[in-house]
Each structure stands twice: as structure tokens, then as C-alpha cells.
Amino acid sequence: MTMKRHLLGAVAGMAASLPLVATAFAGGLEANGYDWDQLFDPAPYSAKASATYVHIEKDVIGPGALGVVSTTPARVHYNTGFKADIFDMASCLVTVQNPFGSDTERTNAYAVSTAPNVQAVSESIRSTDTGITCAVGVQAGPGVISVIGGISAQHLDYRAALPVTATTSSPLSINGWSTGWRAGIAYEIPEYALRVSAIYNAPVNYSLDGTGLGGAASADVTTPQSFEIRGQTGIAPGWLALGSVKWMDWSVLQRLTVDTVRGPLVSAFDYRDGWTITAGVGHAVNEQLTVLGTLSWDRGTSTPRADGVLTAGTQTDRYGITLGGSYNFSPNVQLTGGVSASTLGAGSNARGERWDTGYVFAVSGGLKASF
């Protein structure tokens, strides 16, 4: 195995964990986001699985002398995939991943005090995307240009505890299925470990149904479209530079209105579009070990007023650093892992809530088999 091919395979393997741990606690309701990098794995067949644990240290202080009224619990996300070459210069990838997710916990007394636009005592959003994505390539000069397309079945689950009194709450649970699709293009020159890809993910429209406040509950919601450009290239023997720019249309999500037997419940997000920029360097130490480091910036998706106070929510800019690596136990088995640390900007919002600089710590591990 040449060092270039090893570096390509190692970076493709680390896509099982590093891009995911790097986006831990990104803007809007993003969890792992979408990841299709395994589609470019140089092995004819590969299977991988990874999990990411995210710990958030961010306390929200209520108006006046209320003290801490809101925290963000830790969470776990996962990503699995199986890639196969169908025929020469054509491959398909089957994935199960968690593109969206969020958790919030508030004190019961504070949630009651936010009436009439009452906030929930706790909220949990989880999504599961099960899809297939294929790429068909043709020779173009020294490299290969590929057309990418795919479709997914996506499930969204929203659960909340709604305040009834200062000490009691009532559960709400709604969920639903929908479909999404993606399209893109990529160009690769394996000789130089070069690849550039651009992939568009379409918005997904949901009709959620369930129960809440002693009766039926429902809501219509749209998860945002996104467009991401990723690139990488060899810069010296055993060295690779990589980067990405991603836009997400979070401004499509301004309100979540849940219809219940006691009337509508409205959660205000007032999101603006999200931008994420990542850059890094990878190094193949030898044919077994590869290391990688990245820096990332994620624009806060809560919309600020002219004075800098957010109209709603608590999402400010995030700056992060990620370190990770992969180790080949054999030519066919690879272990990947990474850690990430990020800062979350201090701020305040129109509700009178305020918060100091917060921190996010994440750790991810994965296993890939190729044959």
C-alpha cells in the first residue's frame, strides 16, 4: 500500500468520527449533521460504525435574581454506513445517522413564569436518517468526476414536559416520518490525494402527530436545506490539507407551533442561517497510524438585534479544535477516535436570560472494516 493510498483510506476512515465530533453542538438543532465521506473510501467494500458523546457546560441565568434556570444535558449520537463498489467507477453507500438533535432542561418554576408564551420544562429532539447515496464517475483528464445522488427516510421525534404548576408538568410526545434527497458532484485525482465535493441536501417537511396535555397533539415543521463544499489535497509526502464550508437554511425555522386540545403551544426560535467553516491537516505517521487536527467556526443561529441582544434563544458563535487519529490493526480493520473542545460565546436575549462563555467537550470512537 502506498503512503498516498494509505492517507486517503485513513482520512476516509476518520470521516466516521472526526467530522462528527467537530460539529458537536453546532448551530440550530444540528447533531451529527450529514456525512457522506465514506462514499469515497478507496476500498471496494467498507463498513463502519461510530458514536459521539457530547458534554455541554452552559448555564442560562434567568431575569432578576432567579439564578440558573436552564441547562443543556449531555447527549450521544451515532453514525453507521456500508459502502460497496457496484461496478467500475460507481459505488453506493447505505447510512443510518443522526443529523438533528437537541436537549434543554429548565426549572419547573421558571417555565411556568414564562407564560403566556410558556417554555417547556424539558425538550428533546431526535432524528434518524436512513438512506442510500450513490456516485457514478467518468474519467476527466487526470482524475475522475462523479455525479452524486441519494434519498432517505427520515424520522423526527419531539418530546417535552409542559409546565402545569410551579412543581408539576405534563408530557408531550409527537413524531413522524418523511423523505429527503441529496445531489452533488465530486472530482478526485488519487495520485495527489485530491478531492473536492459539493453536496446539496434538500429540506425535509414533517407532519408530526402524538399526544399532549391529555389529548391529541400535532405540528408541521421543516428541517433545513444545506449546501456543503469539502476539499482535500496532498501537500507533501504523507501530509494532507483539508477544509469545508457549509451553509444551512436555519432561517426556515422561526416558530414551532404544536396544536393541542388546550390550544396552540408556540416555541420561538427566530433562527438565522448557519455557516460552518473547518480547516485542518492530516499526517500519515506510518502505514498503521494517521493523525489529524482541525479548527472550526460555527456562526450562532440565534438572531441578534442591533444592540447585540438575541431576539430569542441562546445560540452564539462556537469556536472549536479537534484532534484525532486512526490506527490500522490490519489491512482490513481500522480504529478511529477523536476529541473536541469548543467555546460558546456569552450573551443575552430579549427574555432577559443571560449566560457566560460556555464550553463543549466531545469524544468519538469508531471502527471500520474494509475488504
Image: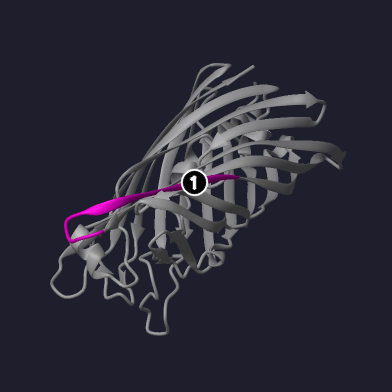
Q: Can residue 24 be seen in this view?
A: no
- Asked whether 90 or 130 is in front, the reply is 130
Disc tally is: 1
Residue 52 position within the rendered picture, expressed as x and y whole percent measured from the top left: 41, 37
Decide if residue 140 is on the left or right side of residue 329: right
Looking at the rendered structure, the kind of residue marked 1 is Asn
Please tell me which residue is depicted at 63% across the width and 55% down the height of the picture: 203
Residue 44 position within the rendered picture, expressed as x and y whole percent measured from the top left: 70, 22
Q: Does the magenta stretch include residue 168?
A: yes
Please tell me which residue is depicted at 32% across the width and 59% down the height of the picture: 120
Magenta residues, dominant SS class: strand
From the image, which quarter does the N terminus lie in? top right
The secondary element bearing badge 1 is classed as strand
- Asked whether 244 or 166 is in front, the reply is 166
Decide if residue 4 is on the left or right side of residue 335: right
- Asked whether 156 or 134 is in front, the reply is 156
From the image, which quarter does the C terminus lie in? top right
Q: Can residue 361 be seen in this view?
A: yes
Q: Quadrant of residue 340?
A: top left
The magenta-colored residue range is 164-177
Please give the residue where the numbered disc 1 appears in the rendered image. Answer: 175
Please tell me which residue is depicted at 33% across the width and 74% down the height of the picture: 349
Label 1 neighbour load within 10 Å: few <14, some 14-19, many 20+: many
- Asked whether 84 or 164 is in front, the reply is 164
Residue 229 position within the rendered picture, expressed as x and y whole percent measured from the top left: 65, 53
Residue 283 position within the rendered picture, expressed as x and y whole percent measured from the top left: 52, 37
